[in-house]
Image (cartoon, grey):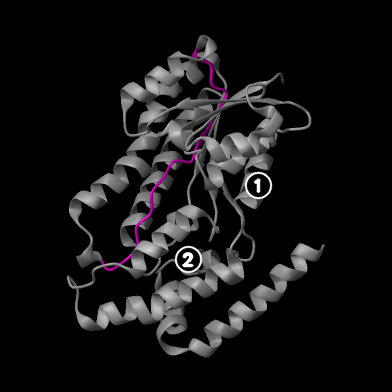
Amino acid sequence: MGTRRVLVTGCSSGIGLAVAARLAKDELRRFKVVATMRDLRKRGPLEKAAGDSLNKTLEIKQLDACCEASIRECVNSLPDRRVDVLVNNAGVGMIGPLECQSIDAMKNLFDTNFFGLARLVKELLPDMKQRQSGHIVVMSSVMGIQGLLFNDVYSASKFAVEGFCESLAVQAMKFSIKTTLVEPGPVVTEFERKVYEDAEKMDLSGTDEETAKIFREVYLPYSKKIFASLGQTPEEVAEQTVKVITAKEPPLRHQTNRLYMPMTALKHADPTGRLPLDAFYKMIFKHDSVFNATLGVLRMLQRSAWKK
């Protein structure tokens, strides 16, 4: 297989930046990376990360996943409109009590997280079908497998992404097009930091006092502990993504964090759904010491993995 052109969205920071830089610096020079972002004024960190690969194996282009014309203009600017691998990474986050979220904010989140993906695939799929080749790689989340407290809307958008890709993958196979959902757990990025910073300043007057207290005094501290214990770096997720892209037979789903897998395994262990609900409820509201002890063990496993 020759050099493959990879279009990556959401490259101004975090996972998108790390994936684009890692692919561009591939020692075997297997990729030509088209790293895109909505606002080109934010290209500085990517240019720094790309280093010598800038304008050689990596070029930066403007693309707004919420605008069909922007997507088409970017794709039309490429030789033969050829995109061998799409890495759909652009996304936004949202946490907090449902009553405190506006419907417009929910729609905006879906416009990026779900419809952004749908627009990109709609533009690229016909060309991939014609060439009888391609790989659609979508940055999903463990929250596309399992809903989590105070992540109702974000999780819903990732569930939509998962259903979309799982359905499309069957048709895509007929045209020799591969589909992969990359499912990170907690990732320590500027994206996550901003979401949690905003959450701490969030106006909770729209909900009841008990829910506000649970969000501030239980959920936010627990989340910080989880990120400290289980959080991956964007570079670690990028490395996992490269493995998926270069695999001879890439999987439909790939969780990047094996330490988080026991949490998602609960969902498949009980078809009624009671087991994960009860486990999360008890862990959060009944057995704080068990939760902290579990994170302590996982933290030790994480350190052990790093040393190997």
Viewer-closest of 41 and 199 = 41
Residue receiving disc 2 = 267
Mark 1 surroundings: few (<14), some (14-19) or many (≥20) residues within 10 A:
some
Report x, y in % for residue 265: 55, 65
Magenta region: 81-97
| Badge number at residue 240 | 1
CA–CA distance between discs 1 and 2?
A: 23 Å
Q: Amino acid at mark 2?
A: Lys
Mark 1 touching mark 2, by CB under 8 A?
no
Residue 289, above or below 18: below
Left of 295 or right of it: where is 163? left
Q: What SS does tag 2 mark?
A: helix
User: In the image, 4: left or right of 189?
Assistant: right
Q: What kind of residue is marked 1?
A: Gln
Q: Is residue 251 shown to the viewer in this render?
A: no
User: Which comes sooner in the sequence, label 1 or label 2?
Assistant: 1
